[in-house]
């Protein structure tokens, strides 16, 4: 157990170091001054510039520069934004939870709709209902997310007018960003009507969540269905049938667990797609998340923001992937003890 | 009335473009309290037979039979629930590949306890019942010859050696106290001493609890020592069937004779270092089975008439399917 944890910790640290090195090299690869790219502070004169160079150890060899950079990252000095002049850590601290929140709800929908549908389709494989579910998932899987979100906006916001167009919550509600998660913030907030605000926030959440969740649900349905069909073919299901267990008992005791165990790592791969889609959808719905923030940074050539933003998103994806794989490793008895950790 | 009575069972496998008859009009009866051996070389359809009886069939398999009955009740027209009930209480099955026949994500103990029918568990409250289940599981495991129950009940299928897995399969089949045990090659992968113990267990259960056993194997020595009757299968056709001692003394079908001759332990007169007699050729694949008697191309006694399938002929309780049987002059 401890050995497994050490394995995964090593994997995580190594991956993070590589990512940090990439982000550090971006400061040199981006056009413009390395000092400005790395810190976000524009020196006013030569003396200030020399002082800053010394402070950020940019006069030393690359390796020492990198070590200093990692130290700064760990201490929370992520530099300043070109555009707003605010510390990047604060900006990301507000933007990141919004993305995590949106992806989490989408993932929630994908799992709680996708797994039962997939199991149903798998158990009824090669029947009309299975074909119906399968083709529906194929269709929704092949929609481009940005197009789908635009269609949703057109139909539900502009034509029917049942859901709001953009943002997280109506401006009428005064919700201070304490945690960054809007639903939690509303519950914490003191001088707002909690139930009204929650209702409003949920309406705002509806369209972005559905547009992200559709693609992920479709892939979860397809993965689950395939896995259930594979398990159904295995000899231990035939053996269980010959012991006179009913269909429901066999499904509950033998099929469900064995079908879900192998697709958990595959779901970890889906997280990358999910977060990418979330970032696209954020831009369309003006959701104040990391995707929207990064797009703005690109427009405004905010190099320090791009550098740290890339590192933050990558960290999020890598930690989720590794955590899910570790979880799967712990709960799956048939995985070998000496198997290596992978991202 | 026989316990299990199967007449002209045909199993067709639909492999997309064509249909192959994997079993062609097979007959099999098992009487109460007897040990019936089902013999044949690999690929003769022994395991298919077991699966057809146990009812766990893939959707592309189609079973038809003139008669397939359990104590006079038709098994083919039973509802799914009746069939399940029959499999749950009356028939226990030991499958050939024990490790893959067990759920890889459950411990052996959990699977064994799951196989105990609810009506055999004593106790009113769930903790009493789970204790009783545990006790029954440990007893059964000891009965099949596993001593270190603590270790193996908590192990997963991929962690145990094949012979332990095989014994667990046997325990799982026996734990519901069935009337008929179908054992598909139960002693595969066991060394001789364990094998003897398992076979002794079968014989004892047969004598003390009058458990009927359908013993599927190609281990002729084991079969000869324990079974009362024998059915020989070749390439999906029943070749010969009758009392063990009659078949051993006077096989009527050329294939049965070849099978018995190929086992050195049956031949006291075999000189040392002599070539073992065997039929030329190999068993045909299911896609290319010969018409008529499927032994035809390999049979030393084959003649023109063999292109039509021989019907079942009967001499007392000894049945055979051959146009030109052996030893006829002595009968």
Image (spheres, grey):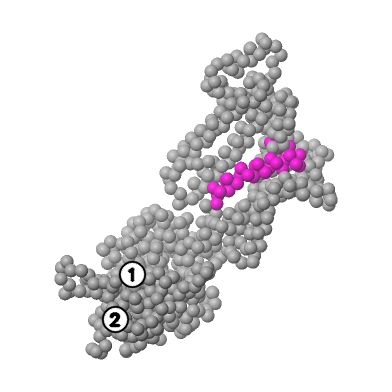
On the same chain: label 1 and label 2?
yes
Labels 1 and 2 touching (C-beta < 8 A): no
Q: Quadrant of residue A99?
A: top right
What is the total number of numbered labels drawn onto the structure image? 2
Which mark is drawn over residue B301? Answer: 2
Query: Which stretch appears magenta?
Result: A263-290
- How far across and down, in percent of the image, does residue B14 sit? 51, 71
Figure check: A247 above or below B207: above
Query: What secondary structure prevails in the magenta region?
Result: helix
As measured in the structure, the alpha-carbon distance from the residue carrying label 1 to the one carrying label 2 is 17 Å
- How far across and down, in percent of the image, does residue A71 sit? 56, 24
Q: Quadrant of residue B33?
A: bottom left
Looking at the rendered image, the quarter that the C terminus of chain B falls into is bottom left
Q: Which residue is mark 1?
A: B282
Q: Residues within 10 Å of mark 1 (few under 14, many from 20)?
A: few
Q: Chain of mark 1?
A: B
- Is there any visible trace of residue B233 in the rendered image? no
């Amino acid at each position: 157990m401890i050995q497994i944890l050490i394995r995964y910790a090593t994997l995580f640290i190594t991956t993070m170091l590589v990512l940090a090195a990439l982000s550090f090299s971006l400061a040199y690869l981006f056009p413009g001054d390395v000092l400005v790219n790395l810190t976000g502070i524009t020196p006013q004169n030569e003396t200030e510039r020399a002082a800053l160079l010394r402070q950020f150890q940019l006069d030393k060899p690359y390796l020492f520069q990198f070590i200093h950079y990692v130290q700064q990252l760990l201490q929370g000095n992520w530099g300043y934004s070109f555009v707003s002049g605010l510390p990047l850590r604060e900006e990301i601290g507000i933007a990141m939870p919004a993305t995590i929140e949106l992806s989490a709800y989408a993932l929630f929908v994908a799992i709680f709709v996708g797994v039962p549908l997939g199991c149903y389709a798998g158990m009824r494989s090669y029947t009309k209902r299975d074909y119906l579910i399968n083709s529906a998932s194929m269709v929704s899987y092949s929609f481009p997310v940005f197009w789908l979100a635009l269609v949703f906006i057109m139909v539900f916001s502009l034509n029917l007018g049942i859901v709001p167009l953009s943002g997280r919550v109506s401006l009428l509600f005064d919700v201070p960003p304490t945690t960054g998660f809007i639903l939690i913030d509303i519950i914490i907030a003191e001088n707002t009507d909690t139930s009204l605000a929650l209702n409003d926030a949920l309406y705002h959440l509806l369209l972005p969540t559905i547009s992200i969740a559709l693609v992920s649900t479709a892939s979860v349905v397809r993965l689950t269905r395939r896995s259930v069909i594979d398990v159904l073919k295995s000899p231990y299901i035939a053996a269980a049938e010959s012991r006179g267990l009913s269909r429901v008992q066999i499904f509950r005791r033998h099929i469900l667990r064995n079908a879900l165990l192998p697709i958990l790592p595959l779901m970890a791969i889906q997280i990358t797609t999910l977060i990418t889609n979330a970032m696209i959808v954020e831009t369309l719905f003006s959701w104040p998340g990391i995707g929207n923030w990064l797009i703005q940074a690109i427009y405004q050539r905010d190099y320090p923001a791009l550098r740290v933003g890339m590192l933050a998103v990558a960290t999020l994806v890598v930690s989720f992937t590794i955590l899910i794989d570790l979880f799967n490793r712990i709960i799956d008895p048939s995985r070998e003890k000496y198997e290596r950790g992978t991202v | 009335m026989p316990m299990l009575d199967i007449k002209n069972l045909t199993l067709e496998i639909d492999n997309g473009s064509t249909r192959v008859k994997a079993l062609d009009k097979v007959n099999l009866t098992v009487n109460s309290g007897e040990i019936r051996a089902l013999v044949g070389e690999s690929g003769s359809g022994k395991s298919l037979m077991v699966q057809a009886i146990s009812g766990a069939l893939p959707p592309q398999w189609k079973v038809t039979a003139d008669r397939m009955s359990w104590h006079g009740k038709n098994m083919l027209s039973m509802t799914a629930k009746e069939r399940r009930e029959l499999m749950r209480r009356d028939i226990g099955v030991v499958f050939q590949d024990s490790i893959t026949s067990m759920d890889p994500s459950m411990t052996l103990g959990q699977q064994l306890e799951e196989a105990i029918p609810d009506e055999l568990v004593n106790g009113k409250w769930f903790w009493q019942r789970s204790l009783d289940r545990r006790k029954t599981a440990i007893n059964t495991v000891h009965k099949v010859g596993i001593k270190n129950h603590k270790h193996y009940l908590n192990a997963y299928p991929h962690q145990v050696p094949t012979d332990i897995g095989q014994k667990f399969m046997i325990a799982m089949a026996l734990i519901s106290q069935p009337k008929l045990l179908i054992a598909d090659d139960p002693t595969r992968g066991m060394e001789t001493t364990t094998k003897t113990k398992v076979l002794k267990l079968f014989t004892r259960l047969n004598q003390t609890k009058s458990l009927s056993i359908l013993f599927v194997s190609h281990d002729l020595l084991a079969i000869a020592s324990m079974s009362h009757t024998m059915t020989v299968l070749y390439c999906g056709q029943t070749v010969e069937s009758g009392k063990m001692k009659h078949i051993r003394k006077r096989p009527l079908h050329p294939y049965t004779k070849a099978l018995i001759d190929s086992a050195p332990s049956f031949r006291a007169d075999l000189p040392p270092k002599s070539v073992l007699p065997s039929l030329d050729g190999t068993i045909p694949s299911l896609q290319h089975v010969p018409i008529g008697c499927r032994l035809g191309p390999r049979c030393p006694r084959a003649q023109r008439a063999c292109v039509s399938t021989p019907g079942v002929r009967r001499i007392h309780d000894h049945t055979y399917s051959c146009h030109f049987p052996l030893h006829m002059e002595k009968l």
